[in-house]
Amino acid sequence: MRVQLDEDVDFNAFYARDSGLNFFHGVVDKVNPPVTAFSGESPHVLCHELGHAILDAVKPELFDAMSIEVAAFHEAFGDMSSTRSALQVSSLREFVLDQTGGNLNVNARLSQLARQLGWAIRVQLSPAAVDSDCLRNTSNNFFYQDPAGLPPSAPANQLSSEVHSFSRVFSGAFLDVLAGMFHIGPAGGPGDESGKLEAVSVDAGKLLIAGIRLATVVPKFYSQVAAGMLQADQTLNNGRYTAALSSSFVHRGILSPATAVSLVRDLRTHGGQTFGVTRAPTGRLQFEGDNEGYKKTASDAPALPLRPITTRFGVTLHVHLPAEPQRFAVAAAALTGGSAESPSPEEDARSFIEDLIQLDRISHEGAADVIPAELTSPGEASPCDKTHRLVKQDGKTVLKRHHFDCGFGGCRHGR
């Protein structure tokens, strides 16, 4: 995989299959003297983009999935990768423990991602585009809502369906999970606090990857990953972290209380063998029905079904639908109480495409005039703006992803 440490001018970075990891720089000239901010200088940004590449290797069918929640989870995974990578550094673990008193999910150094890049965007482009102390803060109070009912962009202190914004629901829950797991402690008895934190960070990473591999690609992808993590904990750890996982995901609305209780009871009753995962004699998890996409390359990776979708704007595109069979009978919480209804794969894809059009994230080079000119923004786009592109395949206009970036869609409006 190629790495471009300083490719062009932008307050951003991205991962693409055809060009690897790409980093940029931007000049903050609204301060004296001016400051040049390099996105590749930030360990958080580096690990975020590498996280996209890792998740693309683990579950490549997510790359082109036209789903708000799937795309937002990809962004959350990048931020969770940054958090876990930070916890591999012993001096930072000690600093975090001293700063937080062991309460890991408070607003502190661990939760504040890409502070310099956040500062640069806040000062140079738009004060409201990013958090007040960093690019994104995983110590937040965002509760799950159906993303189709949210605006496509909003200030950083509000939730929108823009994927970086909506990602904070899951990355915030993961920080809560880490905090809960730390209070429980890893198996193997007492140790120093730094070693304990390192061990639970490793345990959390294993549960996250197993949960992703277990989750099928459906519109409510967050709930499937959460359920997969609970299943993996039962199989790997005999349910050691069940309380931390279930309470965190319920608190965030990623799992409704009723479906979380039902799932945990099923797992405890059946010894964790309910949902197609077993533990091999080697200790590795085995997944029933796994397509082993992690063994594939971009050219032969499994793909989701390709279907035509017509938007409310009169634009028809062929897209890959989040239409796999649901593995776990779980749901997110509804704001009015109970469990939220899941949209159809077609409805989910339509909402995502309409967001991309409204945010002007689609490059038209491969299929000019498919999207009306009235729906596109004039002027030259920055290198990271167009995350998707239109390609012609067998006479069809197909919407494909080009890259995942690290910034907020809203931060470009100040340019």
Image (cartoon, rainbow, N blue to C red):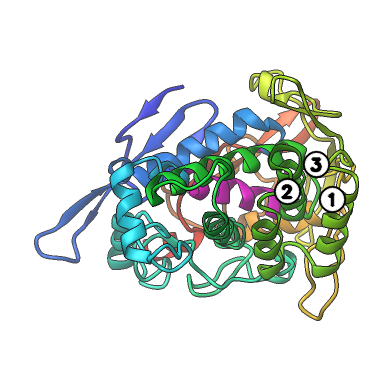
The residue identified by callout 1 is: 268
The residue positioned 83% from the left and 36% from the top of the image is: 306
The residue identified by callout 3 is: 216
- Answer yes or no: do the residues labelled 3 and 1 have beta carbons within 8 Å? no
Query: Residue 166, how many percent across, how many down?
Result: 60, 61
Q: Is disc 1 surrounded by few (<14), some (14 to 19) or many (20+) residues within 10 Å?
A: some
Query: Residue 397, how many percent across, how many down?
Result: 75, 37
Q: Is residue 202 magenta?
A: no
Q: Say which of 17 and 342 sits in front.
A: 342
Report the span colored magenta: 63-81
* Direction from residue 188 to residue 270 in the image, left or right: right
The residue positioned 59% from the left and 71% from the top of the image is: 142
Magenta highlight: main SS: helix
For residue 384, say whether it is visible: no
Pick whichever of labels 2 and 1 is earlier in the sequence: 2
Pick whichever of labels 3 and 1 is earlier in the sequence: 3
- Answer yes or no: do the residues labelled 2 and 1 have beta carbons within 8 Å? yes
